[in-house]
Amino acid sequence: MKIAVVGCGHWGKNLVRNFYELGVLAAVCDHSKASADHVIANHPSVNFTFNYQDILEDKPITAVVIATPANTHYELAYKALEANKHVYVEKPLAKTFNEAVDLHKLAEQKSLILMVGHLLLYHPAVNKLKNLIASGELGTIQYINSDRRNFNRSQQRDTNVMWDLAPHDISMMSYILNTEPEIITSARGWSNNNEIVEVVHLDFTFPNNIGAHIHNSWLDPQKQALLTVNGSKKTAVLNDTFKENKLEIYSRNDDGSITVEKPVYSNDEPLRLECKHFLDCILHKTTPTSDGSNGSFVVRYLEECESKMIVNSTLAAHS
């Protein structure tokens, strides 16, 4: 099996590293000379090209991994599928629901694997939490909150904070609850001078009246990746910024004291597990956990949130 990675920027370098270590990286494509220098220096056995067409015409390449700006995902993924190559594309799958569905349908028509980089679906701590919820360990789930923030002034401005960060939250929440949200009750954003939305708050409801909230921000210098799941028996807190004991389970005793449990789970790198899953799906012709249908649902939900969003801005505040 031979894989090509398209896009060797901040995140693409991690994909290059993982597929190289898995022994399947054959080529890398990027428009940047700095990326070329990085690949040639660190992976001299890997071919580098500035021309995407070289990747599409290279028949021995089995699959293409796309880690480029979000507004290029649809075109690059569509061309790769047309060239009969399996595709792994970073989130979001596309910028519109119709585009996402097009990719999903094309992959199905050609019997090709289409996988979306919803990384947290492969996170060992997230999967441990999913199993605890399914087993009833937390009791009846009542509320779920995800707080994902970082300081991202250098973010490429082809997108906004919701399209950048919320795919993680929406895909993860739906995955651990094994259901999709029913109702969007509120979508609020803040932008600087009506340019790019840099802070969002999303409120919605899952089946069985499970409340949910997402807070995303590009303005926080202290990175936050915190998921809280409140159950009738116990509350789970998953802090992905911790190096160890990311998942903790809290319960209140009759005397008012708090008991904290630290579940055991694998320490495997989530991205390595995700990359390996992609290869396994190609090898065994199985459907990825984050397939085209999963990616399309997330894009549909983001599109709906954006259509409902009320945006405040510094420009509006001073007008």
Image (tube, helix red, strand yellow):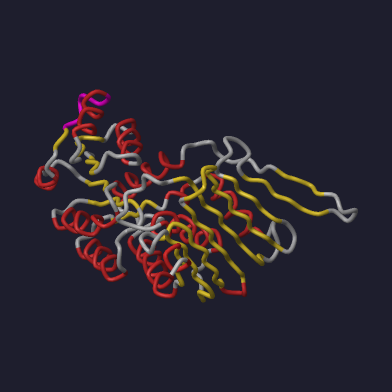
**Where residue 270 sits in the image (x, y, percent)?**
46, 42
Taking the image as shown, residue 18 lies to the left or right of residue 83, namely right
**Residue at horizontal 46%, vertical 72%?**
310
Give residue 86's position: percent from left, percent from top.
24, 51
Q: Main secondary structure of the magenta part?
A: loop
Q: Quarter of the image holding residue 306? A: bottom left
User: From what the image shows, is residue 308 above or below residue 7?
Assistant: below
As for residue 210 lying within the magenta part, the answer is: no
In the image, which residues are magenta?
42-47
Foreground pick, 244 / 176? 244
At 75% from the left and 45% from the top, the residue drawn is: 260
**What residue is at 39 percent from the left and 54 percent from the top?**
164
Which residue appears at 49% of the width and 54% of the height?
217
Relative horizontal placement of residue 58, taking residue 276 as reference (left or right): left
Q: Residue furthest right?
A: 255
On the image, the x and y values in percent for residue 230 come to 67, 60
For the residue pair 105 and 248, the one nearer the viewer reads as: 248
Which quarter of the rendered picture does the C terminus lie within? bottom left
Q: Is residue 107 left or right of residue 180?
A: left
Count of picture labels: 0
Using the image, determine if residue 215 lies above or below residue 207. Answer: above
* Quarter of the N terminus within the rendering: top left
Residue 153 place in picture, x, y as percent: 40, 46
The residue most toward the front is 319
